[in-house]
Image (cartoon, rainbow, N blue to C red):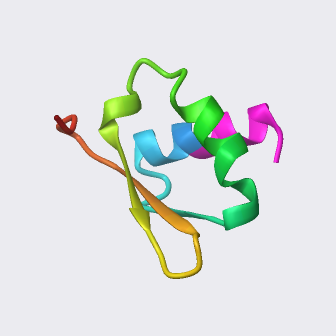
Amino acid sequence: MNEQDINDVLENLKTGNLSEYYVKKEDFMEFRQVLVKREDFKHFRGIGQRGGDVLYQYLEVPRS
């Protein structure tokens, strides 16, 4: 995945086109590096899965 693909996924989560997105363990660090640069970073919730994969969702109310 490149940075543009990741930003596209994050925008689709934000707009509601995607309800959740599954990130494989191999792609996690690259995905996270793009995610933490966003102003709306706190709106994204990552739920760790067995095996190191992460399921991301967008929250209307930012997490604390």
Which quarter of the image is occupied by the C terminus?
Answer: top left
Compared with 8, 57 (above or below) is below
Judge by depth and name the residue closer to the eye, 33 or 17: 33
Q: Is residue 25 above or below residue 4?
A: below
Quadrant in the picture for residue 15: top left
Please report the residue visible at 59 percent of the width from the left and 79 percent of the height from the top.
Answer: 51
Instruction: Indicate the position of residue 43 as horizontal and vertical percent values.
Output: 31, 37
Please state if 47 lies on the left or on the right of 52 as rendered: left
Q: Tag count in the figure?
A: 0
Q: Is residue 63 left or right of residue 13?
A: left
Residue drawn at 42 percent across, 18 percent down = 39
Q: Position of residue 49 (x, y in %)?
A: 47, 75
Residue found 55% across the figure and 34% down from its top: 35
Q: Residue furthest front?
A: 51
Residue 6 is covered by the magenta coloring: yes
Magenta region = 1-9
Q: Quadrant of residue 20?
A: bottom left
Q: Above or below — where is 60 with respect to 39?
A: below
Residue reaching furthest to the bottom: 50
Q: Is residue 24 left or right of residue 13?
A: right
**Residue nearest the viewer, comparing 51 with 61:** 51
Is residue 22 found left or right of 40 in the rendered image? right
- Residue lying at 67% horizontally and 65% vertically, measured from the top left: 25
* Membership of 37 in magenta stretch: no
Main SS of the magenta part reads helix
